[in-house]
Amino acid sequence: MHRRMAVLAALTLTLVAGCGEAASEPAAQDPTATPAETPTAATEAAVTPTADDAPWYDQVPPAQAAGTVGGRDSACHLPLVFSLAEGVKASKIEIPDDVDEAIRDVLTRQGGATTVCEIDAKPIKAGFLRVWSVDEPKRRPRPAVESFVAAAPQVDDPQYRTVKTPLGDAVEATWISTPELTGESQREFALAVRASGRTVLLSSSESMIAEIEDVLSVFRLAVRTIAPSG
């Protein structure tokens, strides 16, 4: 029953999210940025992943940046910022006060983390991303993302690796999840990183009509452009 409710939550969360807004105008490029800080790979030709690329599909390039989220004036004020693809919409998660506490937990919590922002990429047929705040401020990225993955529906083949970011070392995870409601397996990704004294998670989920490279390109753009919030 818990798994079924979790899947229903994933399908209905956008109904209770804030109105949201499309990607904000791109921030000015910093001429002093190093190549590692600037997502130049966004202009590379698309690459269709193969089974040999699993589980990370590193050949999938990031989407083209068209705005940012996380700043004080964006739809979601976060302790970090990252770039959004064109056509993607960010919404602050707001659950009405009259929603039962148990339902609220199903809608917004997973493995010791609470979702605070949803990045809706369904308009470009790429599923969605979510930003989560880990409930224990001192919890480090590795145990935080391990707990998050363990709480996903029917987890198979979880993998972890360290990723360098301007915020320091982050931990990226990928796994295969099979929701009970659909019975269809899909590969999911998450990244945990420390920002402003706490661990923040970024997760991705495919839509039912998306190919893995569609949502992964949006996730890669976010991961490669993560930076401290001003």
Image (cartoon, rainbow, N blue to C red):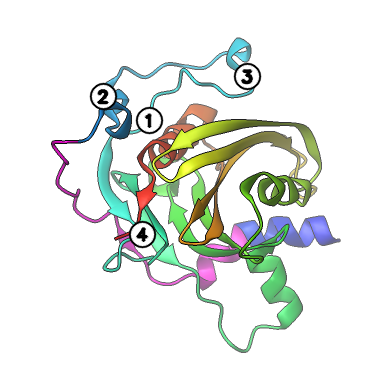
The residue beneath circle 1 is 62
State which quadrant residue 220 falls in: top left
| Label 3: how many Cα within 10 Å (few below 14, some 14–19, many 20+) | few
Question: Which residue extends farthest top?
Answer: 52
Q: Which mark is residue 70?
A: 4
State which quadrant residue 101 falls in: bottom right
| Label 1: how many Cα within 10 Å (few below 14, some 14–19, many 20+) | many
User: CA separation, marks 1 and 3?
Assistant: 17 Å
**Residue type at numbered disc 1:** Pro
Please state if 154 lies on the left or on the right of 74 as rendered: right
Looking at the rendered image, the disc whose residue lies closer to the viewer, 3 or 4, is: 4
Is residue 187 something one can see in this rendering? no
Query: At x 38% / y 67%, what residue is drawn?
Result: 77
| Label 4: how many Cα within 10 Å (few below 14, some 14–19, many 20+) | many
The residue beneath circle 2 is 43
Q: Earlier in the sequence, mark 1 or mark 2?
A: 2
**Residue type at numbered disc 3:** Ala
Q: Is residue 164 magenta?
A: no
Is residue 24 something one can see in this rendering? yes
Query: At x 32% / y 28%, what residue is drawn?
Result: 36
